[in-house]
Image (cartoon, coloured by chain):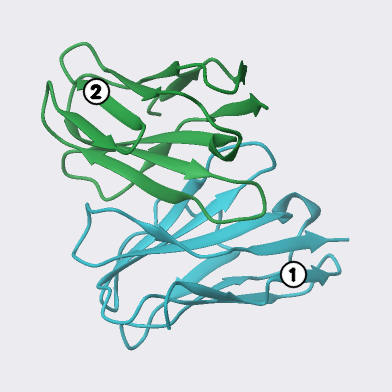
Chain colours: A green, B cyan
Amino acid sequence: ILNVEQSPQSLHVQEGDSTNFTCSFPSSNFYALHWYRWETAKSPEALFVMTLNGDEKKKGRISATLNTKEGYSYLYIKGSQPEDSATYLCAFSGAGSYQLTFGKGTKLSVIP
Amino acid sequence: GAGVSQSPRYKVTKRGQDVALRCDPISGHVSLYWYRQALGQGPEFLTYFNYEAQQDKSGLPNDRFSAERPEGSISTLTIQRTEQRDSAMYRCASTLTSGKGEQYFGPGTRLTVT
């Protein structure tokens, strides 16, 4: 059983604050790490798919880094806005498998 | 269609009945996944199709669960003799190419077994 852990489980920040959270995953047999944004009552929406150690991806105020040797990825949100409130899910994909193993997510609430 | 669609969106059924959940992926998407999502949890893999071939069904919990994608497009997840523990959100997702890319999720079917 693959272990994909996300921390913290939930987070409350003030509008304008920057924040980050962590996804840890197995460092062996790595293929890709996915980040998804999920608003309750909607479908998860892909943010990033990262495959290379040291990779850094950015989409607007959201960015992510990847360390495959130590098995972690950080998601950063700069200048949080209320519309950033959502659950952020990471998912691990191993070499030779089509499965995505999801973490339980970090629920972000941005207080206006 | 613009995105992945699923039907029905909500299904309430009595214990012991069979249910069939439908997924219509984005047109042209090669791969299709089924997931089950419990409240407050991330999606849990059930099965994967590449075109019409079911290439991984290791996540199906038991033999009451089956899935098919006969023409490589629409897929059906069938649960026979439903039990209360089957109650969950069932989501499908599709990817443009085989296997590994960004997944596009459908809105899910909320199944409640009474």
In this rendering, position of residue B106 left or right of residue B74:
right
Which quarter of the rendered picture does the C terminus of chain A lie within?
top right
Tag 1: amino acid: Tyr
* Label disc, if present, on residue B93 of the rendered structure: none
* Front residue of B76 and A75: A75
B23, above or below A29, in the image: below
Numbered disc 1: what chain? B
Q: Where residue B48 appears, x then y in whole percent?
A: 35, 61
Q: Which residue, given by chain and number where applicable, does mark 2 sit on?
A: A65
In this rendering, position of residue B22 left or right of residue A94:
right
Name the residue at the top extreme.
Answer: A70
| Closer mark to the observer between disc 1 and disc 2 | 2
Q: Which residue, given by chain and number where applicable, does mark 1 sit on?
A: B10
Name the residue at the bottom extreme.
Answer: B71
The quarter of the picture where residue A94 lies is: top left
The quarter of the picture where residue B72 lies is: bottom left
Q: Where residue A31 appears, x then y in whole percent?
A: 17, 36
Q: Residues within 10 Å of mark 1 (few under 14, many from 20)?
A: some
Q: Where residue B53 appears, x then y in whole percent?
A: 27, 73
